[in-house]
Amino acid sequence: MTGIAIHSLTPDELDAEAEALARIMADTVETGAAIGYMQPFTEADGLAFFTDQVFPEIRAGRRKLLIAMLDGETAGSVQLIIALPPNQPHRCEVAKMMVSPAARRKGIGAALMRALDAQARAAGKTLITLDTRTGDAAEPLYRAAGFVSAGVIPGFALDPDGTALHATTYMYKAL
């Protein structure tokens, strides 16, 4: 039996998790996940992403970063962007859902999504949105978590290996 624990990182905890998060991101992109980055993608690239882009947003209170621990090891993460334009105070966005390839199919993604809902509610949000590569393995996870498709945009982005364009599915969930 595996033990999954989800934790929302505080600003004081970010640096201690930076290397593990960078490793998960590099492994995720290198195995073909469409999270906005191209191959090759290194741990150094992941570290720069977290330290330069994500951590400042968390410290400023505009974003939440949840990590999943599997048997005491960091195995996944997801972000919740809570600071959106002034006309959208009720909404938040899911960003960069990642589970280490070695830890997939163990319930980590579902646990992260449940915790994300709780974070959104605690922030006073009533609508969560996200986009995902159409047909991606994450799409059924989001549907199981209660997200509904709003539409598909064809030819939205390049696959991480740069060989083809893929469609993206926009999804939402009312809380």
Image (cartoon, rainbow, N blue to C red):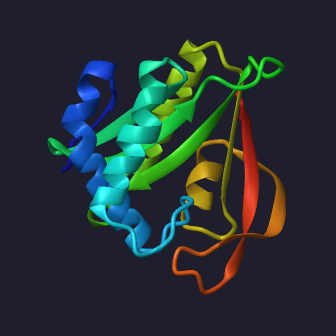
Vertical comparison of 83 with 102: above or below:
above
| x and y, in percent, of residue 4 in the image | 27, 41
Left or right, residue 46 beside residue 138: left
Instruction: Say which residue appears at 50% left-offset and 70% top-offset.
Output: 38
Left or right: residue 128 compared with residue 106: right
**Which residue is most to the bottom?**
163
* Residue plotted at (60% across, 24% down): 82
Compared with residue 110, is residue 65 higher up or lower down, i.e. above or below?
Answer: above
Camera-side residue of 152 and 42 = 42
**One can see residue 110 in this view:** yes
Q: Is residue 170 left or right of residue 10?
A: right
**Picture coordinates of residue 71 (x, y %)?**
16, 45
Residue 149, compared with residue 95, is above or below; it is: below
Q: Is residue 18 above or below residue 141?
A: above
| Residue at x 36% of width, y 58% of height | 45
Instruction: Please indicate, yes or no, whether residue 106 appears anywhere in the rendered image.
Output: no
Q: Position of residue 111 (x, y in %)?
A: 41, 40
Position of 153 with respect to 92 (left or right) is right
Residue 155, quarter of the rendered image: bottom right
Residue at (62% x, 59% y) in the render? 139
